[in-house]
Amino acid sequence: MAKRKAKGLGDTIEAITTATGIKAVVETFSELTGLDCGCDERKAKLNQLFSYNRNINCLNETDYNLLTYLITKNQLTPADQQILTDIYFNVFNYRLQLSSCGSCWKGKIDELRKVYNEYKLND
């Protein structure tokens, strides 16, 4: 079997648990109990949060102008969240889930702010 390059932390943890036999034990336990271990979802989330190679796309003018307004807001409406998810997808190729979690949005806005600030420096 060809070894594939890890996309992020989730793939690395899977490789370690496979090599140590932990994954086989967890899979056997899951089969015997019928309980899902949640490994696939956890791996995907860790790969998303701690990606090893993240392709970042350029901001277009519309997204830049929208961010100028949105990154300074203290509260986001559902419409604001939708706009930010679209911009985030355009930049990071990852679709965010709408959420009422303020700290989750703060982290994503901080990521977008870094990209935005690079453009602002070049104005």
Image (cartoon, grey):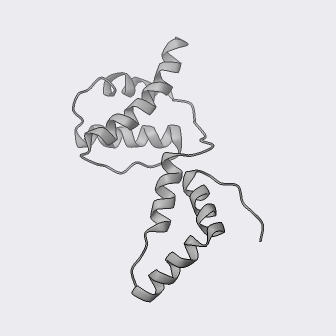
- Disc tally is 0
On screen, residue 70 above or below 107: above
Figure check: 106 above or below 116:
below
Q: Residue at x 32, y 23 (%)?
A: 69
Q: Residue at x 52, y 45 (%)?
A: 50
Identify whether 54 is placed above or below 20.
Answer: above
Question: Quarter holding the N terminus?
Answer: bottom right
Residue situated furthest front in the rendering:
20
Q: Quadrant of residue 22?
A: bottom right
Q: Nearer the viewer, residue 99 or 30?
A: 30
Q: Position of residue 46 (x, y in %)?
A: 49, 53
- Judged left or right of residue 51, residue 41 is left
Q: Residue at x 51, y 83 (%)?
A: 28
Q: Residue furthest right?
A: 2
Expressed as whole percent of the image width and height from the top left, the position of residue 87 reads: 43, 37
Q: Please provide percent x and percent y for residue 106.
A: 33, 34
Q: Nearer the viewer, residue 44 or 34?
A: 34
- Left or right: where 76 falls relative to 113: left
Q: Residue at x 41, y 76 (%)?
A: 36
Q: Position of residue 73 (x, y in %)?
A: 26, 26
Q: Is residue 97 left or right of residue 93?
A: left
Q: Nearer the viewer, residue 112 or 1?
A: 1
Q: Is residue 102 above or below residue 66?
A: below
